[in-house]
Image (cartoon, helix red, strand yellow):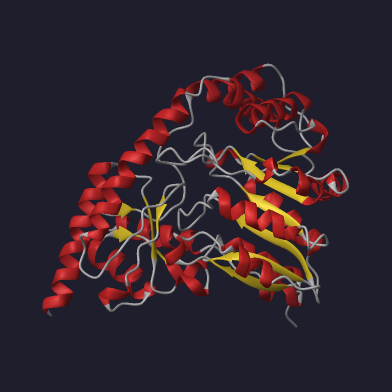
Amino acid sequence: MTIQLSEKMGRLGTESAFDVLAKAEALAATGRSVINLGIGQPDFKTPPNVVEAAVKALRDGHHGYTPSPGILPLREAIAGDIAEHRGVEVSPDNIVVVPGGKVTMFFAILMFGEPGVEIMYPNPGFPIYESVINFSGAKAVPIPLLEKNDFSFDAEATLASITPQTRLIIINSPANPTGGAVPKAEMDKHVAGLAQHPHVAILSDEIYDRMTYDGREHVSMLNYPEIRDRLILLNGWSKTYAMTGWRLGYGVWPSSIVGDAIRLCINCHSCVNAATQWAGIEAIKGPQDDVTTMVEAFDRRRSVIVDGLNALPGVTCRTPGGAFYTFPNITGTGMTSHEFQDRALEECGIATIAGTSFGSYGEGYVRFSYANSVENIQTALQRLEEMLKAKVTA
């Protein structure tokens, strides 16, 4: 007799970027030259002052449990950071510190998701949205992010898709995998329309909020007081401070359900690593020069990769408004998304992620991360050009 898992485990998906990373590392282990434009993390190190703050915390004896929602000095620092960058007052009592950004989305989806319920999510979008919605038993309803809209959502179409069964809408701007950023006019329209649907909660994933370009101001849903009583904000340190491996994120929760989020923390992970929380304070309150340097480097690379992709046979690419991804249209190559991904890795040693890894609306697209050096990006583009030209002449 074999052990038997719950049926819901069969509904839990995964994140293909890690599968591609494993294949890329295996290929590199054979001696092949591999350039990774697939994984979604900065190629910069965590700022030294942040590392030293964690070391100091350990030496000072911060080795034990902390309050489940996070130490008060960190939650106060987060509130101050939101006030500085968004002009919004948030109580530290509404902030819950968690081990990474995923935890806030996982908790929010589990809170609202169950059979008979609908949860709307961006497609193409971060794959864990759809995975956890399905896991919860709710129906996953895609919000199409189309190239013709620069991969922003269409507020009217999104609002028209809301039903009495809709409990939660997930918004991600700037977005993974497309780099799309929702314009303020579209967000205004979306929030105004939500007034007709007071039963719907909103999860706003703003993990890339400090990574916008061309003078674009990030549009935070915290700036709409009319929805604050049903808005959950997701943010963290992973992208802005190059701290993906530290696992530190936070949610800003409505007063009515912040206690439920804390109960989930107690049942799940107890609290976040103590020293990491002190490092988080230093990241927020310390010098921001490293953040500026990193974003400026991403901006330069963005220009290089967009121009280079648009020069490839059969490829067209919109200019992303944020994050550090491009999402080129590769239909002109005659390949599917997965075929392009596999051939790019096997023939060129270039790791990318098929658009279908991010949902059904991703077919015909491939995600490129420009969290790599200009030199490596240019080398990758040259290899892809040779592959595509050889395909044309074959």
Question: From the viewer's perspective, is 339 left or right of 94?
Answer: left
Residue positioned 70% across, 50% down in the render: 104
Whether residue 263 is visible to the viewer of this picture, yes or no, is yes
> Hey, which residue is sitting farthest left in the picture?
393
Q: Nearer the viewer, residue 164 or 9?
A: 164
Question: From the viewer's perspective, is 285 left or right of 313?
Answer: right
Residue 172 falls in which quadrant of the image? bottom right
Examine the rendered structure and indicate whether residue 289 appears above or below residue 299: above
Q: Nearer the viewer, residue 310 or 135?
A: 310
Percent coordinates x, y for residue 65 in the rendering: 79, 32
Residue positioned 75% across, 49% down in the render: 231
Residue 60 falls in which quadrant of the image? top right
Percent coordinates x, y for residue 207 in the rendering: 58, 45
Examine the rendered structure and indicate whether residue 82 appears above or below residue 33: above
Q: In what quadrant of the picture does the C terminus appear?
A: bottom left
Q: Nearer the viewer, residue 216 or 255?
A: 216
Percent coordinates x, y for residue 58 in the rendering: 65, 22
Question: From the viewer's perspective, is 77 left or right of 201?
Answer: left
Percent coordinates x, y for residue 117 in the rendering: 79, 72
Question: From the viewer's perspective, is 39 left or right of 157?
Answer: left
